[in-house]
Image (cartoon, rainbow, N blue to C red):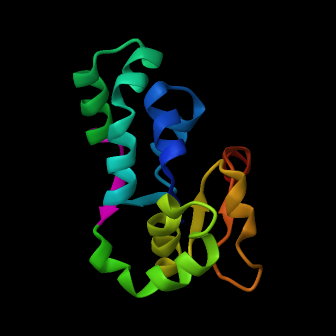
Amino acid sequence: MKVCVDANVIISALIGGVTREILFDPKFEFISTEFTINEVRKYMPLIAEKSRASVKKAKIALSVLPINIYKREHYSGKIEEANRIIGKIDENDVDILALALKFGCYLWSNDKHFDCIPENIKTRCIKTKEIIAFG
């Protein structure tokens, strides 16, 4: 099952816990955007502090997460639609929603503002507790 992963999920996985375990579950294919990964990189000092690791180790941990990263050119045809749905709420989430729309897959995020995705759209936001239930 293909699942698009938001920054808050990746940050949580780098800090530790069940989210990290889920990311290594082979029944899922996790994808994200370069934009999202760059957002995560901005929080490396905080991630390192919370995980009690060095920034260097946190960066290494990010690099080994089994997430396929897509450049904007792969989902650019969905940017406008994503912007209409989420752009006014959080412009930083346009790319991740566009990628999920491109593949028509779940978007794993714990952000409540993704609840605004219309029901007639193939993409649906799922929270960590829901993805655990898939297990």
Horizontal relation, residue 112 to residue 13: left or right: right
Going by the image, does 119 lie left or right of 44?
A: right
Q: Does residue 57 appear to the left or right of 12 in the view shown?
A: left
Q: Position of residue 21 (x, y in %)?
A: 52, 35
Q: Is residue 59 above or below residue 109?
A: above
Side of 90 relative to 121 (left or right): left
Which residue is more in the foreground, 22 or 125? 125
Residue 69 covered by magenta stretch: yes
Based on the picture, tell me whether residue 73 belongs to the magenta stretch. no
Residue 11 visible somewhere in the drawing: yes
Name the quarter where the N terminus is drawn: bottom right
The one of 125 and 66 positioned closer to us in this rendering:
125
Say which residue appears at 54% left-offset and 77% top-offset: 82
The residue located at (46%, 51%) in the rendering is: 26
- Residue depicted at 44% across the width and 68% down the height: 95
Q: Residue furthest front?
A: 88
Q: Is residue 59 above or below residue 113?
A: above
Residue interval drawn in magenta: 64-70
Displayed quadrant of residue 47: top left
Q: Position of residue 50 (x, y in %)?
A: 47, 17
Where residue 126 appears, as percent x and y from the top left, is 68, 57
**Disc count in the image?**
0
Q: Residue furthest top?
A: 52
**Which residue is nearer to you in this view: 122 or 45?**
45
* Rendered residue at 53%/44% (across/down): 9
Q: Is residue 52 above or below residue 32?
A: above
Report which quarter residue 57 is drawn in.
Answer: top left
Q: Nearer the viewer, residue 82 or 107?
A: 82
Q: Can the viewer see residue 3?
A: no
